[in-house]
Image (cartoon, rainbow, N blue to C red):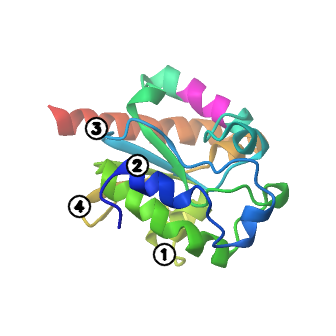
Amino acid sequence: MYENWEDLENSIKNCKKCKLCTNRTNIVFGQGNKNADIMLIGEGPGADEDMQGIPFVGKAGQLMNMAFDGIGIKREQVYIANIVKCRPPNNRVPENDEAEACLNYLRNQVVLVKPKIVVLLGSTALKNILGNENSITACRGNWIEKKGILYMPTWHPAALLRDENKKIEFWKDLELVVEKYNAMVV
């Protein structure tokens, strides 16, 4: 475990723990408020993220930003990271060994951020953080508490691009996050 952000970020700069390193343009470490009470965890970078080195800047990220604006979350207030830090080819789901190679980086990010709430964006985030026995369709929209952190599983923003009906549920899940957070800080 790294005690500070600089050491953690330096540790990943030349990472070659899995085959995803062979095609990356940039490592997509994470972005946002490093002392955030709310952290969001997605699956992995897409093409836009790989080019810019910033999570959630493509179409799915733009959709997420619109949802943030609508319910009063400022992107600068939260911390956003992914299960894997390098783009899987053709945006496929990260393989188990790839996710496993990156999980200690992510765990260290969680330890350093110390979030009160973690929003798990999609099945890959849910399964890697809370266990393979969990299903996004069963867990979505329900609070799960583990080791003093509240988790809210919801749809990955990319799923909203494929299925318009999920937008309302995603929005409602984010509203629950804001509601819970506001209740915590009162």
Q: Amino acid at mark 1?
A: Gly
Mark 1 or 2, closer to the camera:
2
Q: Amino acid at mark 2?
A: Glu
In this figure, which residue is indicated by the disc labeled 4?
148
Q: Residue at x 57, y 60 (%)?
A: 83
Residue in the foreground of this view, choosing between 154 and 57: 57
70 in magenta: no
Crowding near pointer 2: few (<14 within 10 Å), some, many (20+)? Answer: few
Residue in the foreground of this view, choosing between 129 and 53: 53
Chain-order first, disc 1 or disc 2? 2
- The reply to whether callout 3 and callout 1 are in contact (CB within 8 Å) is no
CA distance for labels 1 and 2:
29 Å
CA distance for labels 4 and 2:
26 Å
- The reply to whether callout 3 and callout 4 are in contact (CB within 8 Å) is no
62 in magenta: yes
Describe residue 158's horizontal placement relative to residue 39 as left or right.
right
Magenta stretch: give its range: 61-67
Residue in the foreground of this view, choosing between 20 and 63: 20
CA distance for labels 1 and 4:
17 Å
Secondary element under disc 1, as helix, strand or loop, is: loop
In this figure, which residue is indicated by the disc labeled 2?
6
- Mark carried by residue 131: 1
